[in-house]
Image: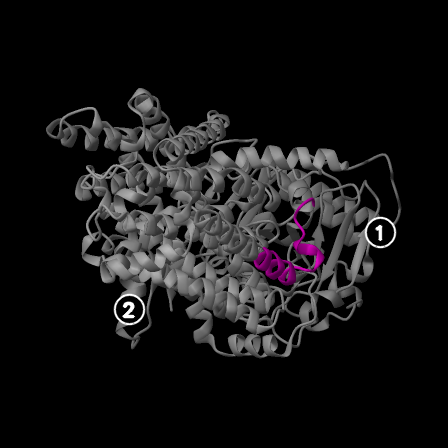
Amino acid sequence: MIMQFLLSHVILVFLFLLAVCQTFSGFLTNFSWHLHLVSSSEKHSMDLGDRKCWGNSKKDSWRTTLVLAYQSLGVVYGDLSISPIYVYKSTFAEDIHHSETNEEIFGVLSFVFWTLTLVPLFKYVFIVLRADDNGEGGTFALYSSICRHAKVSLLPNKQIADESLSTYKLKQPPETENGSKLKTLLEKHKTLHTALLILVLLGTCMVIGDGVLTPVISVFSAVSGLELSMSKEHHEYAVIPITCIILVCLFALQHYGTHRVGFLFAPVVLLWLLCISGLGLYNIFFWNPHVYKALSPYYMYKFLKKTKKRGWMSLGGILLCITGSEAMFADLGHFSYAAIQIAFTFVVYPALILGYMGQAAYLSKNHDIATDISYYVSVPKSVRWPVLFIAILASVVGSQAIISGTFSIINQSQSLSCFPRVKVVHTSNKKHGQIYIPEINWILMILCIAVTIGFRDTKHMGNASGLAVMAVMLVTTCLTSLVIILCWHKPPILALCFLLFFGSIELLYFSASLVKFREGAWLPILLALILVTIMFVWHYGTTKKYEFDLQNKVSLEWLLALGQSLGISRVPGIGLVFTDLTSGIPANFSRFVTNLPAFHRILVFVCVKFVPVPFVPPAERYLMGRVGPASLRSYRCIVRYGYCDVHQDVDSFESELVNRIADFICYDWSHPETASDPDNGEDGGLQSTRSSGEYRRAVIGNSDFSTTRAFDPDESMQHFSVSVGFPTAESITDIVETDPQIIRRRVTFSVDDHNDSDEPTDRQMKEELQDLLDAQQSGTAFILGHSHVETKQGSSVSKRLAINFAYNFLRRNCRGPDVVLKVPPASLLEVGMVYVV
């Protein structure tokens, strides 16, 4: 009767919490754009570059969802599934000991069960996964969503035209009064903008730190199974070298990518989950069928009552059972909400619970191994070697997932001007998001080897990894609370309940890890401090450079007047001048013309900028406009990328850019009210902007039926926030082009000589297109700035340290902009510039 009562008690509590969480999550997301069951699975496949619908039928949709759920096992759950190897060993390492009463082991099992239930299942699966950014997840996705709903972004060169992107605009329910007050408070104080950015950077740095610690503890714990097959003396000299060899091989093979062996990841993790769940069931029925009683929360109370402070400190080992939970949200863009939910709820979660229950059942009847609790002691000797082999494979898969995630988050940080420039290599032409960063790869390898040799035991590794994991989860909880208010427009009381409930759980575990500061927890804190300093200094220096460019840009009239006195000549070819400015002439180009009075016959000012969205549709990427009259043959091209977009190689970019210019020329001459020459007397309401040489811009698409939007240039756009004097994106008039001959995708273009016309506009358009074609055949030069940054006299000591030493050191030792933009050295022209900020 007692057993039945306890079992029914646990089941009722579980069902009650599940119902409450479903109701809470459903209340939070009762509007259509959060229903991902069909739309997200159709929108996001493993190949994000091919964003086509999987199928119209419900059967195909569910089949696709199940396939994605299976694939997510190898990418998302490798780290989480390997945790049973080291959770009990880390928990019983020092603070508590396994006793005859079994109160400790049952208490730990109860903590593990409810921690897995509340954090990964309720928090992530039912709530956090819904806080996506156009299907993308992770720390930057939350920050991006917040920045689009409140003007708190610190990114430079923002434009009102960015708000018209299809991935930027969101359908929103009515905003609440309290939510509006919080939004006003955040937008009003610039210090809150900086604090929010530092919070995001801290979470990002902890993810990178986890990329160092997870491979170490996973591979080390898996290889530690050798201790049962050899003497203690030989074991000490075998585990560490074998771990280091596996780690070196793992990082040495990164440049080949995972697309060749990625199909093996899901079967390996699935085999491992079946292994631990099968062994768990065996141990439960063979050793202690009544172990399910320990799932009752009462055993947590008994555990803390007996162990007191030592039990609280042991929570630093228990929290390792949720290591890798953040990957469910971070890798959301590769799969779908429904796929990740199904995989965890029906496969990963039951397998982990059975695995932990099986270990507890074995330990509850075997007290002679109290000083050496290891996962492998609960494995029967007849299958110990196969289990060891599968565990090592699963640990490698889990390590590969976190390494790939580290590459991705550093690439996102670089896109948002929060990380020094690094070389990003795309290892697959078919699978989006599979990247390799050589510098980061070798740094991670060196750090992993150093941690393995330095710590040499699971206890210190677990303390370090646990603190990094909980720090990331705390940041996610704080940012999700802001999303609930600012993006979902729910009452602040709901966000406060979410923050207090899950934040208190995570703070409890975080405090237990922080106590172990001298026993390994210092490492992620040290790594985070170093990385936050690097990222914030780089962002600060980049922002100051942009402000200098903004203040020192020159007008077109000044440049033309200066050119007449110097006798500027035009040389054949296309000159691409790269700048961060979206309007005006950059100072580095005026310096170039002053010292070398010549520039190319076709001149294009190119601004490659990043928008706080994960993806920019190719049809909306290029914002084109003129600089000066049509006779000058000078254009401005603003190329917009999202933080998850793949950069084009230089050949395809050059060809695409020329095609966009040709399409813009056709569009511009076919709309004389926005066209060409200010001398024709048709200002079209743009007198104030045409006086500065800037003309109306248009988004040039690449489809047969493309939407071409016209925008006014934003000369007086504020740096940190959009000016209230400008029209919103909804008020901008859309112009739809239906002629497939005007806007189309092509590799090269040609001028049609058969359709002769006496119309002046047609003749002028053909002349301009012919000039563009001749210039393309003559070659393209890439003009980039080579900068040196220094502070003004009288600057504060902190500013001088940040700019003169830290920023310049990072700038000298990171990749140049030509490497990031993949510019061929033979076509590169660099202009030296001194920035005094």
Q: Secondary structure at mark 1?
A: helix
Q: Amino acid at mark 2?
A: Arg
Number of labels in the image equals 2
Place residue 291 in its image quadrant: top left
Q: In the drawing, does residue 513 fall left or right of residue 67?
A: left
Q: Which residues are magenta?
A: 19-38
Q: Amino acid at mark 1?
A: Pro
The structure residue drawn at horizontal position 24% and vertical position 58%, both measured from the top left corner, is 307
Does residue 269 appear in the picture of this structure? yes
- Here the colouring is one colour
Of residues 244 and 649, the one nearer the viewer is: 244
Q: Mostly what secondary structure, the magenta segment?
A: helix
Does residue 568 appear in the picture of this structure? no
The residue beneath circle 1 is: 760
* Residue contact at pointers 1 and 2, CB within 8 angstroms: no
Residue 648 located within the stretch drawn in magenta: no
Place residue 556 in its image quadrant: bottom right
Numbered tag placed on residue 800 in the rendering? 2
Q: Earlier in the sequence, mark 1 or mark 2?
A: 1
In the depicted structure, whether residue 107 falls above or below residue 647: below
Residue 810: x %, y % from top left: 32, 54
Cα separation, mark 1 vs mark 2, equals 58 Å
Residue 738: x %, y % from top left: 84, 47
Residue 33: x %, y % from top left: 68, 55
Q: Secondary structure at mark 2?
A: helix
Judge depth for marks 1 and 2 and give the one in front: 2
- Callout 1 environment at 10 Å: few (<14), some (14 to 19), or many (20+)? few
- Farthest right residue? 758
Of residues 152 and 765, the one nearer the viewer is: 152
In the depicted structure, whether residue 89 falls above or below residue 569: above
